[in-house]
Amino acid sequence: MAVSYTVCPNCNRVNKFQTNKQNPTCGACHGNLDYHEGVTQLSTEQVQKLIAKSPIPVVIDFWAPWCAPCRTFSPVFSETAVELAGQYVFVKLNTEEHPSAGLHFNIRGIPTIAVYQKGREVLRQSGAFPKDHFVSLLRGTSSSNSIAP
Ligand SMILES: [Zn+2]
């Protein structure tokens, strides 16, 4: 049983929830947390809030519906999210719907993956890549983080 974190789309509170629960709801307003297959879709402001509060690393997929490599990478992101639920928080940020993301996170191309731990960026990689590569990138951040203070 894994625990993860997200921001409620209704009241913007950071929520802790069980990832094995069907349609988890917000502890504050009881709205739906919109968590599906290991992933939540959030706005720029919600991602910033989550990065600041989450005790586990936050992995963000910056994407847009018009971007073909993003669509290629999307199932890789989802599969990895299900597999590593509880170890990382997996979030998708639609840069077309939330154009402020580009400026806030300095996104130069999509898809871009960025990992934040304790509010700090610890990894960034652009372009679509296979799941094995994605998992080893993430494992790299967790091993270096366990050594850091
Ligand atoms: Zn809520």
Image: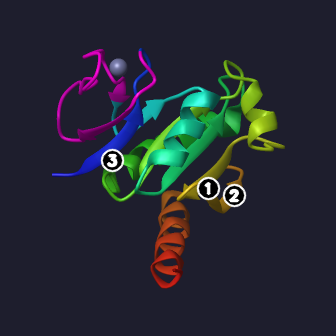
C-alpha span from label 2 to label 1: 9 Å
Q: For the residue labelled by badge 3, is the local secondary structure a helix, a strand or a loop?
A: helix
What x and y, as percent, mark residue 49?
A: 54, 37
Left or right for 109, reference 59? right
Residue shown at 74% from the left, 43% from the top: 105
In the displayed image of the protein, which residue is found farthest to the bottom?
Answer: 147
Q: For the residue labelled by badge 2, is the local secondary structure a helix, a strand or a loop?
A: strand
Q: For the residue labelled by badge 1, is the local secondary structure a helix, a strand or a loop?
A: loop
**Label for residue 129?**
1
Mark 3, residue position: 82
Does residue 30 lie above or below 41 as drawn?
A: above
Does residue 121 lie above or below 68 as drawn?
A: below
What predominant SS class does the magenta segment belong to?
A: loop
Dot 2 alpha-carbon crowd within 10 angstroms: few under 14, some 14 to 19, many 20 or more? some
Residue shown at 65% from the left, 38% from the top: 62
User: What amino acid is found at the position of numbered circle 1 in the picture?
Assistant: Phe
Give the mark, 3 or 1, whose residue is nearer the N terminus.
3
User: What amino acid is found at the position of numbered circle 2 in the picture?
Assistant: Gln
Pointers 3 and 1 in contact (C-beta within 8 Å): no
Pointers 2 and 1 in contact (C-beta within 8 Å): yes
Mark 2, residue position: 125
Kindly tell me whether mark 3's CB lies below 8 Å from ligand 1: no
Q: Give the residues in magenta.
A: 11-35
